[in-house]
Image: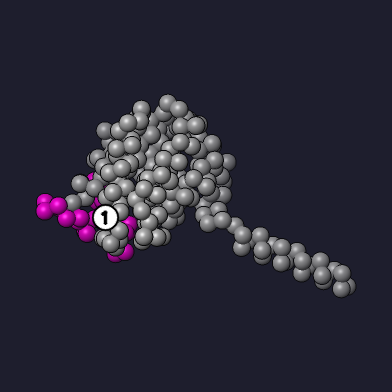
């Protein structure tokens, strides 16, 4: 009886420990795998990869009629997470275009983070994309200036500038700047484009993104 109890306790502790050791966003990635098993992802699609601004854009296909879009935005992910899960985010798909929105949460996690660190994280992910898809179109959507993160805007602006410069030199690559269209006539960020948390966007915000993104969509 004692041996059975000991074995049960060992299995219980092993299970609890294994659950605790799961990396951040592990379940989100498993959910993507389930979706892909239930509905095989179409080839020649437009793959969205990034953080919650994509995650919450659940009806993105309605904004781009006629386009086949796979949305793989997850949680409050950072570029470090995109790099960590790059195999899961890229290998299951055969897209004709990849659009990335990420980096905002990298700064939010560390207010002292230098822009060069975030730029290097993106370059690392870009390199991983190119290793699998040498010739497809790859675009980066500029980091938006969320009112709730105004203290981080200087680093974000520097990162946007440096990533834009990098993408300009790359083949089949573009930097999609959504920052200007989110400003009012005086050049201030329109708070009415954000929901109560002043971080995530309203449908009007996504409509403005769509207007800017459309010319870049394959």
**Above-or-below relation of 180 to 126:** below
Residue designated by label 1: 154
- Residue 64 shows up from this direction: no
Q: Where residue 52 appears, x then y in whole percent? A: 39, 53
Q: Residue at x 26, y 33 (%)?
A: 215
Q: Where residue 7 appears, x then y in whole percent? A: 81, 66
Taking the magenta stretch, the answer to whether it contains residue 199 is yes
SS of the residue under disc 1: helix
Picture quadrant of residue 148: bottom left
Overall secondary structure of the magenta section: loop
Q: Which residues are magenta?
A: 184-208
**Above-or-below relation of 7 to 138:** below
Q: Where residue 46 appears, x then y in whole percent? A: 40, 35
* Relative side of 131 to 186, left or right: right
Q: Residue at x 32, y 57 (%)?
A: 200
Question: What is the residue that sits farthest to the bottom in this orientation?
Answer: 2
Image quadrant holding the N terminus, namely bottom right
Q: Residue at x 44, y 53 (%)?
A: 77
């Amino acid at each position: 009886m004692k041996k059975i109890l000991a074995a049960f306790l060992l299995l219980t502790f092993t299970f609890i420990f294994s659950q605790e050791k799961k990396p951040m966003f592990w379940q989100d990635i498993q959910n993507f795998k389930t979706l892909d098993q239930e509905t095989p992802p179409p080839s020649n699609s437009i793959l969205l990869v990034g953080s919650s601004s994509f995650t919450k854009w659940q009806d993105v296909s309605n904004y781009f009629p006629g386009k086949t879009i796979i949305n793989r935005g997850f949680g409050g992910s950072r570029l470090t997470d995109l790099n960590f899960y790059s195999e899961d985010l890229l290998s299951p798909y055969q897209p004709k275009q990849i659009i990335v929105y990420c980096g905002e949460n990298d700064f939010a996690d560390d207010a002292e983070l230098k822009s060069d660190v975030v730029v290097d994280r993106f370059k690392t992910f870009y390199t991983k994309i190119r290793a699998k898809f040498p010739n497809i179109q790859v675009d980066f959507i500029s980091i938006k200036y969320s009112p709730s993160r105004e203290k981080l805007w200087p680093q974000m602006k520097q990162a946007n500038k440096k990533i834009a410069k990098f993408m300009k030199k790359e083949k089949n690559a573009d930097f999609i700047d959504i920052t200007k269209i989110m400003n009012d006539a005086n050049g201030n960020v329109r708070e009415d484009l954000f929901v109560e948390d002043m971080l995530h966007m309203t449908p009007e915000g996504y409509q403005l993104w769509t207007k800017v993104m459309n010319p870049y969509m394959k």
